[in-house]
């Protein structure tokens, strides 16, 4: 009996340790994601400031909404550089992130995530020129509330969401293809349809990613490989960051008020 109580006590202590570790892991995931979002916002705001001028003598071009663009703005929003900034994040996700996770240290993975967030900020900087600050803030708050609810559901639910995740990832591939095609079509109706589907797909992925992050930690916590767990935290932060950012951008298509 005493031996059984000892075993049960050890198991209980181990369960408490894993539970505390899971909370710390999730805090690291959400904290890293939040820092990434802040970097993105600051980079977007800074580049937008460099791209727009109020001095007609310093303007290199004028947008349809009357905003005057500097040479920096023309290069980013009108020249070939805009395609580089548009596809660089995708190239990094498909070809760079996996290699970094496999061969890089936790510090290198963290740096890669923050650099990616900065590039995304540059790529998204036009929202500060096209949309009003009020509508951007409003959309961000709506996205944050929805994200919190969806992530909480993914963390707490006992339902296995892995099958849904596979289906949604196929949807993401379809979205990317549709968006590339619509670059040449330029159809606002198609873009609205893509945005509606995008909100639904990334809403589902938010719940799926949260559950996957939790399950991944629980499956590997007993190995004691802290370096791997640290990298897994940044990988989870990137997944949730992408879901949040895409939900925000797609919702902005509906809620955003143009300047």
Image (cartoon, rainbow, N blue to C red):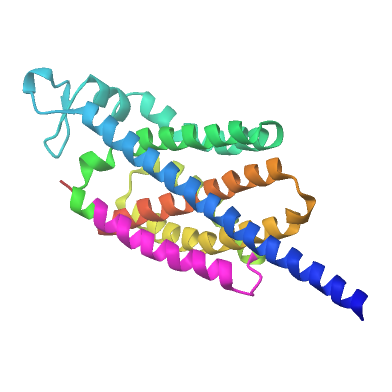
Q: Which residue lies furthest to the left in this view?
A: 56
Residue 181, placed above or below residue 143: above
Where, quadrant-wise, is the N terminus in this rendering?
A: bottom right
Residue 215, placed above or below residue 54: below
Q: Is residue 224 visible?
A: yes
Query: Which span of residues is magenta-colored?
Result: 136-161
Residue 32, placed above or below residue 49: below
Residue drawn at 42 percent across, 60 percent down = 199
Q: Position of residue 173 (x, y in %)?
A: 55, 49
Residue drawn at 13 percent across, 22 percent down = 59
Q: Using the image as rendered, state which of residue 69 and residue 28 is in the foreground.
A: 28
Give the tally of numbered discs: 0
* Predominant SS along the magenta part: helix
Residue drawn at 66 percent across, 65 percent down = 163
Residue drawn at 64 percent across, 57 percent down = 21
Q: Using the image as rendered, state which of residue 2 and residue 95 is in the foreground.
A: 2
Q: Position of residue 121 (x, y in %)?
A: 37, 37
Left or right, 2 with reference to 72: right
Q: Position of residue 41 (x, y in %)?
A: 33, 41
Quadrant location of residue 250?
Answer: bottom left
Left or right, 31 with reference to 96: left
Q: Where is residue 17 in the image (x, y as percent from the top left)?
A: 69, 61
Left or right, 73 with reference to 207: left
Q: Residue furthest bottom?
A: 1
Q: Can residue 184 be seen in this view?
A: no
Left or right, 251 with reference to 27: left
Give yes or no for residue 28 being in the magenta stretch. no
């Amino acid at each position: 009996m005493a031996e059984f109580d000892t075993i049960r006590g050890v198991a209980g202590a181990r369960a408490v340790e894993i539970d505390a570790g899971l909370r710390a892991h999730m805090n690291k995931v959400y904290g890293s994601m939040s820092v990434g979002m802040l970097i993105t916002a600051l980079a977007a705001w800074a580049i937008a400031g460099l791209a727009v001028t109020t001095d007609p003598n310093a303007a290199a071009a004028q947008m349809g909404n009357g905003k005057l663009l500097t040479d920096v703005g023309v290069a980013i929003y009108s020249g070939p550089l805009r395609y580089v900034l548009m596809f660089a994040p995708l190239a990094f996700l498909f070809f760079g992130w996996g290699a970094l996770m496999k061969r890089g240290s936790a510090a290198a993975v963290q740096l890669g995530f923050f650099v990616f967030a900065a590039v995304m900020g540059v790529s998204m900087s036009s929202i500060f020129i096209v949309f009003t600050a009020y509508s951007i803030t409003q959309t961000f708050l709506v996205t944050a509330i929805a994200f919190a609810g969806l992530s909480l559901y993914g963390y707490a639910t006992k339902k296995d969401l892995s099958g849904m995740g596979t289906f949604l990832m196929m949807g993401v591939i379809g979205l990317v293809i549709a968006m590339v095609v619509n670059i040449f079509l330029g159809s606002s109706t198609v873009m609205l349809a893509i945005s509606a589907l995008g909100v639904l797909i990334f809403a589902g992925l938010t719940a799926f990613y949260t559950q996957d992050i939790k399950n991944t930690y629980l499956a590997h916590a007993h190995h004691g490989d802290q370096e791997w767990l640290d990298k897994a935290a940044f990988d989870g932060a990137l997944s949730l960051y992408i879901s949040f950012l895409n939900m925000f951008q797609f919702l902005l298509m509906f809620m955003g008020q143009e300047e």
